[in-house]
Amino acid sequence: MENKDKVKNLIDLRAEAKLGGGEKRIASQHAKGKFTARERIDMLLDEGSFEELDMFVTHRCYNFGLEKEKYLGDGVVTGHGTIDGRTVYVFAQDFTVFGGSLSETMALKICKVMDMAMKMGCPVIGINDSGGARIQEGVTSLAGYAEIFERNILASGVVPQISAIFGPCAGGAVYSPALTDFVMMTEENSYMFVTGPKVVKSVTGEDISTEDLGGADVHAGKSGVSHFKVENEEEGLMMIRKLLSYLPQNNLEEAPIFDNNDPIDRLEDSLNEIIPDNPNTPYDMKNVIHTIVDNGEFLEVHRNYARNIIVGFARFNGVSTGIVANQPNFLAGVLDCDSSRKAARFVRFCDAFNIPILTLVDVPGFLPGSGQEYAGIITHGAKLMFAYGEATVPKVTITLRKSYGGAHDVMSCKQLRGDFNYAWPTAEIAVMGASGAIEVLEGRTISSMNDPEEKAQFIAEKVADYNEKFANPYMAASYGYIDDVIEPRNTRFRVIRAFQALQTKKVVNPLKKHCNIPL
Ligand code: HXC
């Protein structure tokens, strides 16, 4: 072959690789409303920044006639590029090649970019669209998955890992995403399950649709496996870019600091009146969040799951901050198994990646009852307590209204190493609410009373007395558990000031192999 033909041959080979499983399968992918692996990467990364690796890799399988069916690149597109100028490593499974199923060589390609990301301290983004282990390969595919899983585990807490689920993902294809920091699913075409509906039917007899078994609504709302539900792939890819803007490249760096044009001393008079007079009347905590953060911008994580707690990212004076907030608008903001797990994971993520945490408290306590006890609320609640207690990033806590009982302790109280704990004058910090407390303390007297009017008056007096003593932040402030009682409208400024004063915080936990968080 002459040299000029060699160049032409290269160009031809590249063109062939770019077709993946061929034009027919690409058309079928498009017909389902899905983009191809390369189209997805192009949309995700800064224009023209993608450098592809391993385009000429093919599988090594000789079973079931597979040796006659080879595709350049073998089912995954891998490489690196930039997002807002910062390097990321990516892999995107190519459903047009054996349904994106994982072969030994495909695993090697994915592991290569994961290893490079670790070496360079850069995030890894995986776009998943895969039928799981490549059936024809058998155990080498399983081994390939385990190689990926091990890398996911070792990279956890070192570089951010983000998984987009843009197709049907079964078997091994769901476990790698589950080991990463954030999972995103599209409303249509995106499924995650350990075993698909057909296997479910044959093993348990349960008849269930693909959507109901592992669609985006299920995982964003019920199981909590997915952190973000997006309408379509474009929205999802833009969301990944946005999410990364709040994150550092790795655990040794800080998140990028943005120019801020929102005045740091902006007073918000509406906050002085946002807490209703009736302590049982809800209000929307998201209004508080949007009001105090830079330019009202808040990227909510797990929006549809355990809505009694809100978690997400915002900026204060340009600095990326994780926010955890009870939501009185949903189940009165109570802590239960799901909300505890959700918040614990978020707190640990922020701590792993040097992102300060703001906690906004309005919590009536843990949800009581056999349902929660049987589901292990003790262990799940302990997760959140553990996460806050071990976190060494700057922690600022504001108590807006209720902060009762164990939930008071859990929600980043002073003794769990809260750095600055402020309260609004509307805060109520006590072991429990007034009526519950009087029920316990005066139960015998109350039940001995026969005259209903006398009883009601007695209870009202005791409740008023209790509220006088406890339905305020000043007892906690008198012990120094609350550092200051602040005017609600000035919250933004006080939060920014607090985090500025904590910038140089250095706390090191006792040396250990690892902790034993109650899983
Ligand atoms: C090899 C596969 C494949 C697989 C799909 N294909 N899955 N090839 N191994 N696992 C191929 C199909 O043969 C087909 O090839 C092409 O991909 C597209 O698949 P379709 O079935 O036509 O597409 P669709 O109707 O959209 O259904 C997609 C699907 C379904 C839901 C993913 O293919 C499916 O159920 N696949 C099997 C899922 C599964 O059980 N995987 C094993 C999990 S066990 P052609 O040539 O027609 O284009 C596992 C163990 C690891 O992963 C555990 C580690 C913890």
Image (spheres, grey):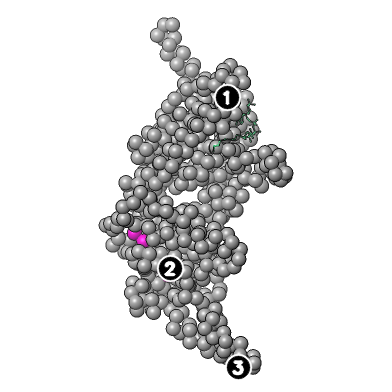
Residue with the mark numbered 1: 21
Q: Are marks 1 and 2 in contact (CB under 8 Å)?
A: no
Give residue 508's position: percent from left, percent from top.
Answer: 30, 55
Q: Quadrant of ligand 1?
A: top right
- Mark 2 residue crowding within 10 angstroms, few (<14) / some (14–19) / many (20+): some
* Amino acid type, callout 2: Asp
* Amino acid type, callout 1: Gly
Q: Is residue 396 magenta?
A: yes
Q: Nearer the viewer, mark 1 or mark 2?
A: 2
| Residue at the spot 39% in from the left edge and 34% down from the top edge | 115
Identify the secondary structure beneath mark 2: helix
440 relative position to 248: left or right: right
Residue with the mark numbered 3: 454
Ligand 1 closer than 8 Å to label 1 CB = yes
| Residue 117 makes an appearance in the image | yes
- Mark 3 residue crowding within 10 angstroms, few (<14) / some (14–19) / many (20+): few
Residues drawn in magenta: 394-399
The image quarter in which residue 489 lies: bottom left
309 relative position to 492: left or right: right
Mark 3 or mark 2, earlier in chain = 2
| Residue at the spot 56% in from the left edge and 55% down from the top edge | 304
Residue with the mark numbered 2: 409
